[in-house]
Amino acid sequence: MGLILHDVDVAGERVAVRIEDGAVASVGSEDRSRSSGEVIDGRGGALLAGLHDHHLHVLALAAARRSISVSASTTNNATFAAALRDASTRGPVRAVGYHERVFGGLDRDVLDGIVRGVPVRVQHRTGGLWILNSCALEQIEPSRLADARFERDHAARLTGRLWRGDDLVRDDAGLRDGEIAAIGSELAAVGVTAVTDATASNDPSSVACLRALPQRVRVMGPIELALDDSERLTLGEVKVVPDDDDLPDIDDLVRLVLEAHGRGRGVAVHCVTLVQVRFAIEAFRVAGVRGDRIEHASVAPADVIADLHALGLTVVTQPAFVSARGDEYMTDVDPRDVAALYPTASLLAAGVPTRGSSDAPYGPIDPWEAMRAAVQRRTARGTVVGASERIRPSNALALFTGSDTVRAGLPADLVLLSVPLSDALARLRRDDVVLTIVGGAVVYDARERPPRAG
Ligand SMILES: [Zn+2]
């Protein structure tokens, strides 16, 4: 049984697209005599290659959906403690999005002063730091507490701060049925047909969870992660997260890159500072590049961009950080670095392969918001950050769809919009998504929703 998308706009032409066996079988004038299967009337709406969110964290996203937000935009010094106390009346508290601006530096004692007797843990908005109260610490196995990522003070007492230790407090055991599928539906509703899960600590149990997504999934993880590649799940890059204050030995990174290449995998290095990106570049200069990626490239001045291009590295950027966090960057980031924050136009102009992503839950999940941010680079308060880095709407869309237009032979990972491409590009809105198709199967259909009243 095939599917025919009748009267859709592909690259400016009104055509019919026939889907068979999970792939695009033909694009052109409709031959009704050969038509078997369901026919969907596209009403002239654009048919695009499905969107790929090239960097997000699905399990963290599911956890964030059952967390409270304590970000600077939802809480302040006066309401932070009350928000934690209120949440603690309903059970253990998982709070995310924290910024020091809200309540200063946190440790177990500060949190104990707010909530005792109920486990509370607060995640820093960067995702790299958890702060636990004493009750939450008590619930962790003693063998895990011995891990050096649990910070201790000069008297060897746990401070409650846990650095880059998601795996030590992970709670996917508490994952409820349907939670991952719900994330999949959320992504399908914005036109996402493929994701790359960029979690460094992915293991067989996270892989099992990720199978509940209707999207194609590329799974990053440590060098030892193995996966039976299936049609929908493939093994991605080895993820490396260097720490500015404690950079690994560059020879170790070189060795890891060589080992990954030997296994046919690339390496993706998390680079949010100039130190990190320069460190990664030096390692790749020695080890060579085979499909390797720089995640974020949050600070990338011209000389770094030239090196990225010369080495053939791909950059995976998060344009929505500029809109969602831009006001904080304007106060937190060294003014000399602001001009080089999350560059996009310069990367494209230099010919560096550049992909778009959300980094959800650390950034907004909606790729259309990211596209608008790439075009406007406007913060919530209306400041334009790095005006020269703005890009055209078609280029913003291509960060997520790639440059392929819909043609015969491609997998039927498609998004149908309610309007022609020119209209969609003028506004880049998630509301325009009508239908999302993965491998020929409809995974989201806005036409099923009851019409809005009025
Ligand atoms: Zn990330």
Image (cartoon, rainbow, N blue to C red):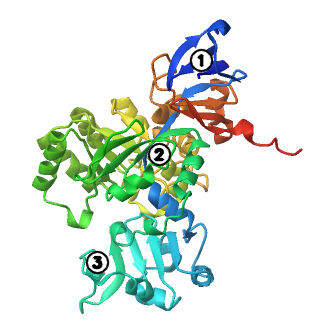
Are the two marked residues, 2 and 3, in contact with CB atoms closer than 8 angstroms?
no
**Left or right for 450, reference 293:** right
Q: Residue furthest right?
A: 454
Q: Is label 2 in a helix, a strand or a loop?
A: loop
**Amino acid carrying mark 2 in the image:** Gly
Residue drawn at x 26%, y 80% is 143
Count neighbours of disc 1 (C-alpha within 10 A) and say few if under 14, some if 14 to 19, many if 20 or more. Answer: many
Q: Amino acid at mark 3?
A: Arg
Mark 1 and mark 2 residues within 8 Å of each other at the beta carbon = no
To which residue does mark 3 refer? 144
Residue 453 or 439: which is nearer the viewer? 439
| Residue for badge 1 | 17
Q: x, y (%) of residue 24?
A: 51, 20
Horizontal side of residue 359 vs 80, given as left or right: left
Counting from the top left corner in percent of width and height, residue 304 is at 27, 43
The front one of 150 and 99 is: 150
Closest to the observer, 222 or 423:
222
Judge left or right: residue 421 versus residue 158: right
Q: Which residue is mark 2?
A: 386
Q: Earlier in the sequence, mark 2 or mark 3?
A: 3
Q: Nearer the viewer, mark 1 or mark 2?
A: 1
